[in-house]
Structures are given as C-alpha cells and as structure tokens.
Amino acid sequence: MPYVRINQPFINTFLFALSLGTLLLSSCNKPVDSSSSSSDANTSNSSSSSSGESNHYEMPSKYASYYSTLGSNPTASQLRSIVSGHTKISYSAAADAMTETDRDWTLSPNASDDNPYMRIIYASYNFKTGSSGAAKRSDYTTIWDKEHIWPKSHGNFDTGNDPGCDLHHLRASDKPNNNSYRVSRNFGIVTSGTTGKDHRGLNSGKYNGKTDDGIYEPVDQDKGDVARACFYMALIYPSNCSLVNSYPKNGTTLGYLNTLLEWHEFDPVDQFEMNRNNLIYENHQHNRNPFIDHPEWAHSIY
C-alpha cells in the first residue's frame, strides 16, 4: 500500500473539530439546575414568578398602580408619601388579624377555618402538624404571642400609637424565644453566644449581650422578613425609627443596618411574605411594605 503523507496542520484542524463536536454533544445532555419553588400556600392575591436575578418573589401586577406616581428610583420622602397613609388597627385586634395574615396556608388552606395552623417567627417547628409541630391560632398566649420586630424600647413608642400596632412589623412569634432571647436586642451576626430554644425545645436563633443592647440572630428563614420589616419602619416612622451600624441600647435607633441589607438578599421575599403583604393591604391597613414589592429600593434608600 503506498504511503500517503497528510499535512500536519490538517490533522490538527481535524482533531480540534472532532473535540469541539464531542463537547457540544455532551453538553446537550447536562441536567438543568433549577431551584425549587416556595412550598408556602397561596391565595388568589399572589403571583408565581420571581423577580430576576435576586430571586425575590414578584409582586402581582394588579398592585403596580399603588406605585404609579413614583419613578423607578424614588426617594425616601416620595415613597413615604405613598405608604404612610393607612388604616390604623388596634393592638388588641392584631391577633385576630394574624389568623389571616400569619396563618400557614399550606397546612390550613381553608380560609373559613378560624383555628388555623400559624407560621411563627423565631421558631423552628413551622410546617409540621401534630402535638410536636406547628402552633395553631388557639395557642395564642401559650405558644405564641405578638412580636414587635422593631422593639418598643428602640422606637420610643407603645401599643397605643401607630408604630406599636402596625401589622407590617407585628408578627406571630414564638413566645419563649421572643420573651427570653430576642427581647429588645439589636439584630446582627452572633459569632460567640448562646443558641435559644423555641417552645418545642428546638434550636432557634442565637443571642449574646444584654437584653437591650445585645445582639440577636434569627434562624435563616426569618432573616429577610426581619430586614424588610425594619426597612419599612424606618421609612414610615422616621421620628421613631432609625437604622444604624451600631448596637444601641434604647431610644429611636436599631442596629445593624449593613447586616440587615445582607439578610435582605440572603433570605429573599417568598410567597408567604408577599401574600401577607397583600392581605394587610386588602383587608386591614390598606398600605403595603414597598421593600417586599420592590426589593431593589432597600439598597437605594439605605
């Protein structure tokens, strides 16, 4: 058989094309990496999409008109002019409102159920049924109570005026964790401290320092909710609430701002939080937390 000499550049080109073709074929069979959607139940008020790269749950388009007079990057005063007008509810009525706003819609999907399972902040037993699981509405004052996410001692208010009875920062809260560990501590990262226990004896949140100027770090699932409630309070009640990068004792300031901004992205808006915002707007206060609807505004305002 006669010897045939093949040009070396031709061989190199052929081998490169062959390798490229193999790579492209193999990539066609790679699985798609997708995050699971929120397991929280929804009412007709919520959408099912997320807003872009940050993965915050998207505001339903029906509420876009609420912000129609604002530009894409409003100032704090412009935003306050929209949000501050609201219907005040009494502190004593908040627990009844929470039967709707803070219910676990997965475990209790029937809106007519007046003793639903509740989604409790500062607790690790959410989403479970039975005696060792989630709390119910009837467990109010025993397992859970009403929590001021912005502590009264850091806002110079009580339960008789607007800041003290605003549902956007009042949450159904695990009672022992709230009363013994959260108390009035600032929010922050606890690098050396004690792990608190919720009513079921489960690890839930960390804390250190004194009850007023110490630090409390909630469980991961609550961090974004806490941050957005604090952003709302500092926006709508500027004479009572100011966020700072320190750990103040009392007065009208609360820390730690930079940590809250990190938590805002670490724990994005989920279906439960958006649905809660919708219910407060539709049925109770008739105003919205803009940092749930437009998460990007937290970074431009704070």
Image (cartoon, rainbow, N blue to C red):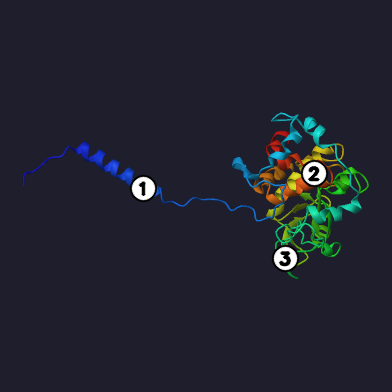
Q: Position of residue 104 (x, y in %)?
A: 74, 58
Q: Which residue is at the far bottom?
A: 131
Q: Is residue 294 visible?
A: no
Q: Earlier in the sequence, mark 2 or mark 3?
A: 3
Residue situated in front as seen by the camera: 190 or 177? 177
Give the quarter of the image for residue 103.
Answer: bottom right
Residue 137 numbered tag: none
Residue situated in front as seen by the camera: 123 or 192? 123
- Give left or right: position of 240 versus 135: right
Q: Which residue is at the far left?
A: 1
Q: Position of residue 240 (x, y in %)?
A: 87, 40
* Label 1: which secondary element: helix
Circles 3, 1 touching at the beta carbon (< 8 Å): no
Mark 3, residue position: 202
* Label 2: which secondary element: helix
Residue 25 numbered tag: 1
* Label 3: which secondary element: loop
At 49% from the left edge and 50% from the top edge, which residue is drawn? 32
Which quadrant does the C terminus fall into? top right
Q: Amino acid at mark 3?
A: Leu
Whole-angstrom CA distance, mark 2 to mark 3, is 33 Å
Q: Is residue 33 visible?
A: yes
At 65% from the left edge and 56% from the top edge, which residue is drawn? 39
Mark 2, residue position: 281
Q: Earlier in the sequence, mark 3 or mark 1?
A: 1
Instruction: Identify whether 225 is placed above or below 14.
Output: below
